[in-house]
């Protein structure tokens, strides 16, 4: 016979630790991270199961008029919660593995059906007692089909293991330990319960949850370090991608020619070139969006240098109706450079117009960079190596920092229009 007092103490202790995990998760809750949502549900289910042990074991064998109702209520609630535990973890795992929406939907429907079946059996058991019953002596009596109830809890766990094997490439090596331990410990608890009738399944499940939690924190720390490293590399890459050698050579050559023909203009061009380089270098440390007016100033500096080179062959039109918003640094200048380099410069006449406009809409700000250059077929994938990496870089940073979108429309022989839409409600950016 197991020690009832020890079971109650373990249940209280595990409930307290699980409550701490739940409160911590609630405090750090990220509404964009669905895994936090399912982890919170796991904590609640295990707390309910563990707390049910206290009135259940506190009433065993005691002859009081209302004790049987306490035992029946506690045992039913515990049994009912057990049917939710493994489906909740399956949903958590599916989100953690970043499965596609179709697969997620299928899993959720299957787990909903499983839970409905399990809970229906739990309700039927109250009438027929085929899994368990409460005797007249107020004791827990295992029914003939009780092992089937335990097997039903193991089936989703086996499915979870199959998901882990199938999508193992999506899990960090450091994350395997906690994930496997969480799945295996409850099954060990079920085996002990079947063998000795000692009800330690939920205690084992709570211990597995602790391991899972600390495993998650460890993985998140590694992931954060990786993201910080990639962010640092990305900033350097952005800076270097914007200081293109051909532009530097052309600008310096133009300045050299001006030194002989027009020293005053050469001085102005040198200062503009200096501002251009400083802006690119400073952008490495920019972790937040900057005022559009600041980005526009940088674009104007770039276009001033290009106009020194092309003269009347490059016409620039500014139609700026709104500047009171933020945008990631070095996102408009690359678009202007792309229009000049690939659109206008490739025209047979070599003469073209670049138009930059901005205006406010009810729910967003829009920026248009248009040219009357050669254009291109948007349905064909460009085959020019690295030329479009910069454009994708701009698109990614617009989305990540301002939740902005970039739309490209182009017609061969007519020109290209790039539209950047910046919503007024931008996401919060971690400046740390």
Image: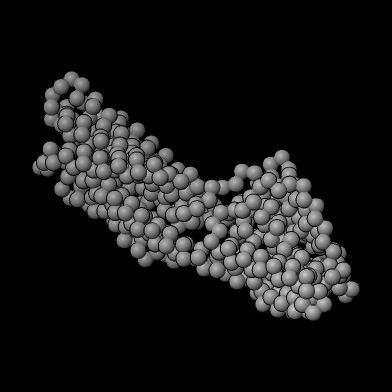
The x and y percentages for residue 69 are 24, 25
Mark yes or no: residue 200 visible. yes
Decide: is 220 above or below 337. Answer: above
Seen from the viewer's position, the closer of residues 137 and 360 is 360
Residue at the farthest top position:
65
Residue at the farthest front position:
264
Mark yes or no: residue 113 visible. no
- Please indicate whether residue 234 sits to the left or right of residue 188 in the image: right
Seen from the viewer's position, the closer of residues 276 and 181 is 276
Which quadrant of the figure has residue 389? Answer: bottom right
The x and y percentages for residue 201 are 24, 46
Give the residue at x 64% y 61%: 330
Give the residue at x 78% y 53%: 357
Decide: is 170 above or below 112. Answer: below
Give the residue at x 33% y 56%: 215
- Please indicate whether residue 404 sits to the left or right of residue 375 in the image: left
Count of numbered tags? 0
Seen from the viewer's position, the closer of residues 220 and 308 is 308
The x and y percentages for residue 34 are 47, 47
- Please indicate whether residue 385 sits to the left or right of residue 237 in the image: right
Which quadrant of the figure has residue 337? Answer: bottom right
Decide: is 50 above or below 96. Answer: above
Which quadrant of the figure has residue 118? Answer: top left
Colour pattern: one colour
The x and y percentages for residue 378 are 76, 65
Give the residue at x 39% y 41%: 26
Is the N terminus in the top left, top right, bottom left or bottom right quadrant? top left
């Amino acid at each position: 016979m197991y020690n009832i007092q020890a079971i109650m103490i373990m249940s209280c202790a595990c409930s307290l630790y699980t409550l701490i995990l739940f409160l911590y998760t609630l405090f750090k809750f990220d509404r964009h991270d669905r895994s936090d949502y399912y982890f919170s549900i796991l904590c609640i289910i295990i707390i309910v199961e563990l707390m049910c042990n206290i009135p259940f074991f506190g009433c065993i064998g005691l002859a009081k008029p209302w004790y049987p109702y306490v035992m029946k209520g506690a045992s039913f609630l515990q049994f009912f919660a057990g049917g939710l535990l493994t489906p909740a973890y399956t949903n958590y795992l599916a989100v953690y593995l970043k499965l596609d929406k179709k697969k997620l939907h299928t899993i959720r429907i299957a787990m909903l059906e499983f839970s409905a079946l399990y809970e229906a059996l739990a309700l039927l058991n109250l009438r027929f007692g085929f899994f368990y019953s409460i005797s007249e002596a107020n004791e827990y009596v295992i029914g003939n089909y009780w092992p089937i109830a335990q097997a039903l809890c193991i089936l989703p766990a086996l499915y979870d293991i199959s998901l882990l094997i199938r999508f193992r490439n999506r899990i960090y090596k450091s994350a395997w330990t906690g994930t496997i331990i969480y799945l295996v410990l409850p099954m060990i608890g079920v085996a002990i319960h079947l063998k000795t009738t000692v009800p330690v399944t939920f205690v084992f499940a709570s211990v597995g949850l602790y391991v899972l939690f600390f495993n998650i924190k460890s993985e998140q720390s590694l992931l954060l370090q990786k993201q910080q490293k990639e962010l640092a590399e990305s900033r350097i890459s952005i800076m270097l991608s914007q200081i293109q050698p051909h532009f530097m050579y052309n600008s310096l050559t133009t300045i050299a020619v001006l030194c002989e023909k027009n020293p005053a203009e050469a001085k102005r061009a040198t200062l503009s070139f200096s501002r251009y380089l400083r802006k690119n270098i400073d952008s490495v440390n920019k972790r937040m969006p900057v005022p559009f007016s600041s980005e526009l100033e940088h674009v104007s500096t770039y276009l001033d240098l290009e106009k020194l080179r092309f003269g009347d062959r490059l016409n620039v039109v500014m139609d700026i109706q709104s500047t009171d918003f933020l945008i990631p640094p070095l996102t408009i200048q690359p678009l202007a450079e792309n229009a000049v380099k690939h659109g206008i410069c490739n025209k047979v006449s070599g003469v073209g117009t670049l138009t930059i406009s901005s205006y406010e809409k009810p729910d967003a700000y829009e920026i248009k960079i248009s040219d009357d250059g050669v254009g291109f077929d948007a349905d064909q994938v460009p085959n020019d190596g690295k030329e479009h990496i910069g454009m994708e870089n701009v698109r990614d940073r617009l989305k990540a920092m301002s939740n902005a979108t970039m739309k490209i429309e182009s017609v061969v022989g007519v020109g290209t229009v790039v539209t950047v839409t910046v919503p007024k409600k931008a996401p919060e950016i971690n400046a740390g």
